Structure formats: structure tokens, C-alpha cells
Image: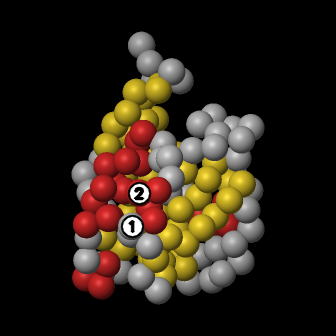
Amino acid sequence: MKKNIDVVGAAFIENDKILATKRSDDRILGTLWEFPGGKIEKGETPEQALKRELFEEFNDDIQVGDKVTDTSSFEYDFGTVNLTVYYAKFITHNFNLIAHSKVEWMSQEELKTVKWADADQLAVGEICKADLSKVKFG
């Protein structure tokens, strides 16, 4: 039986743009675009996991906002990824890249122009039609 992997991602909003990150070529799903984040550890809430992961990936503190959409599940060779994406914004801006080869701020229209990891596509669709001015942060 394949393992279930619960992950969380951040759709950062800044100046009406969304942060998209491209996975490093040498990683699983390399070259695909995704929302930054990672695995939820035992005992963590999704919001706690997101704050920890973004501190590990970018060395930044973040504020977690509304959930983008329901959790999406996608079966890969290595297991089933259950992804929940939240809107977020940066509190600090260190932006050290560890897991990604490229980071880009994109308009909602531009999000449709890159190849996203399958698990992220439901959230991309929701973000493209959302009114970003109505997103609330804790």
C-alpha cells in the first residue's frame, strides 16, 4: 500500500501577485512549479507546519491566512500527496532558497503559464478566480 503524505503549501500574496516556486531539478518532481511548504509532522497543525517549513526553506516568518480550497489528493509513484494550501504573507523577507531553483511573483493570469505539480493544480485554479483583496489573515 502506498503511503499517504500530508503536506501544506503557502500561496503568498504581495502587491496583487502570488509567489510561485520552481522545484530544483535534482529533487522529486524537479522542474515543476509548486507553492512552497512541506510535510506536516506528527502533532502539528497545518498552520504550524507551514510556519516551520517556510522558516526552514526561506528563513522567514510568515502570517497564515484563509485556506485556499479543500485538500487535494494526487497519487504519485512514491505515494499519495494530500495538499492543503493556505494564503500567506511574509512578516520578514530573507528569502534564502534551499529547495527551489526559481522563485517568481506572478499575476493570477501568469499562474496559468507554467507547469504546476499535479497536487497544486486545484489551488491554482481557485487562486486564478479569487478576489485577492478579500483574503483574511489570522
Q: Where is residue 93 in the image (x, y as percent from the top left)?
A: 66, 81
C-alpha gap between disc 2 and disc 1: 6 Å
Residue carrying label 2:
112
Residue 136 lies left or right of residue 107; in this view the side is: left
- Looking at the image, residue 3 lies above or below residue 132: above
* Residue marked by disc 1: 109
- The amino acid type of the residue labelled 1 equals Glu
Image quarter of residue 134: bottom left
Q: Is residue 15 above or below residue 87?
A: below
Q: In this view, does 8 lie to the left or right of 71?
A: right
What kind of residue is marked 2? Lys
- Look at the numbered disc 1 and give the secondary structure of its residue: loop
Q: Which residue is drawn at 50% across and 47% down?
A: 115
Residue 108, quarter of the rendered image: bottom left
Classify mark 1: residues with Cα within 10 Å, few (<14), some (14-19) or many (20+): few
Nearest the eye: 136 or 121: 121
Q: Is residue 82 left or right of residue 53?
A: left
Q: Where is residue 33 in the image (x, y as percent from the top left)?
A: 54, 51
The residue located at (63%, 43%) in the rendering is 31
Q: What element carries label 2?
A: helix
**Number of residues whose C-alpha sits closer than 10 Å to that of mark 2, classed few (under 14), some (14–19) or many (20 or more):** some
Residue at screen point 30% across, 70% down:
66
Find residue 25 and report its image quarter.
top right
Is 2 drawn above or below residue 62 in the view shown? above
- Look at the numbered discs 2 and 1 and tell me whether their residues touch, using CB distance below 8 Å: yes
